[in-house]
Amino acid sequence: MVINVRTAVDLGASLAQALRYVNAWKSRTVVVKYGGSVMMSGVSSAGRDTVIEDLVLLKGAGVDPVLVHGGGPEITRMLERLGKTSRFVDGLRVTDEETMEVVEMVLAGRANKMLVSMMTAAGGAAVGISGKDGKVFQARKQDGPEDLGQVGEVESVDTTVVKLLSTNGYLPVIASIGIGREGQSYNLNGDHAAGALAAALGASKFILLTDVPGVLAAGVDDRPLSTLRAGEARRLIGDGVISRGMIPKVEACLAALSAGVPTAHIIGAAQPHALLVELFTEQGVGTMITP
Ligand SMILES: Nc1ncnc2c1ncn2[C@@H]1O[C@H](COP(=O)(O)OP(=O)(O)OP(=O)(O)O)[C@@H](O)[C@H]1O
Ligand SMILES: [Mg+2]
């Protein structure tokens, strides 16, 4: 929805609608995944990072946002600087020991702390952790036809530390790294990890923010699908219309929905204040995935 500021009457109606939503969302958990594809570029078309602003505003309004983030492009850049090229199998980075070291340095270090810095600068109180802390993401090696090294899948989620932070006024910022039974590090797909966390927290909403405005169906136009049913999503994956990085997003939404999360959305981070519009307006933005 475009808030019409031309008349005070329209503005009043918009504010009343927004405030009704704000009240309805108080103390409810919203798990947000911020894609590495957009978060380091740092800006929406408003010329600044409104995602960070929105998260801080939501927290201030009494909502409980929890952020899970990726950092793919930054990891690739760092590996290149070290003279290492990445190999991907079905969108997953083959992660040998040396690569895992860099993944952890960049995700749990630079990317995580940069998000915390930005939130602090925006007036928020954020605590950045990796999924290893408090065993948020206990993980095991991902099985498959090819050995992907330390690519992991979530085995179990421990929400204790996340709730501890959330209920004490902090905005948790979680790097998508998992811990194995022997303390080893696993490189997790951020979308899957975020979906598992949304399910474990019993979140009221799961939102994936990425570099496209939603799920696009080829041949229509540039506008994303406003809703997408599970069956249709599987067909679009089968047809190759949904491919690469969009596959784990749709899968994570479907997993969260079947675990009882009421709504799951894939939305573009470039639209200014996309998170606020999604939460506090009837229309919302991007693509809503439905069971
Ligand atoms: N049907 C589709 N609609 C929209 N995007 C699609 C579709 N099929 C494939 N994609 C691709 O999915 C990409 C988004 O996933 P990607 O993994 O690149 O981003 P991210 O998850 O936000 O970032 P990161 O993985 O670095 O954390 C889009 O940029 C687009 O290229
Ligand atoms: Mg991705």
Image: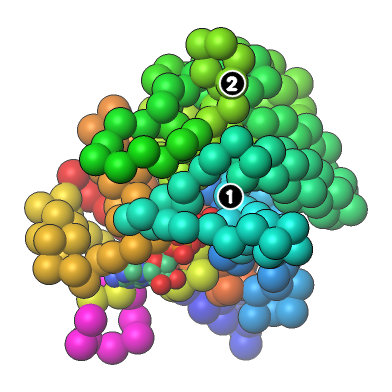
Check disc 1: other Cα within 10 Å, few if <14, some if 14-19, many if 20+.
Answer: many
Q: Earlier in the sequence, mark 1 or mark 2?
A: 1
Residue 70's disc number: 1
Using residue 99 as the reference point, say whether residue 232 is left or right of it.
left
Q: Is residue 34 left or right of residue 58?
A: left
Q: Which residue is more in the foreground, 270 or 136? A: 136
Q: Residue at x 58, y 50 (%)?
A: 70
Residue 159 appears anywhere in the view? no
Extent of the magenta region: 218-225
Q: Is disc 1 in contact with disc 2, using a CB cutoff of under 8 Å?
A: no
Position of residue 198 measured from the top left corner of the image (x, y, whole percent): 44, 33
Judged left or right of residue 204, residue 78 is right
Query: In the image, which disc is placed on residue 184?
Result: 2
Residue at image coords 62%, 87%: 6
Label 1 residue near ligand 1, CB within 8 Å? yes
**Rendered location of residue 207, percent (x, y):** 46, 50
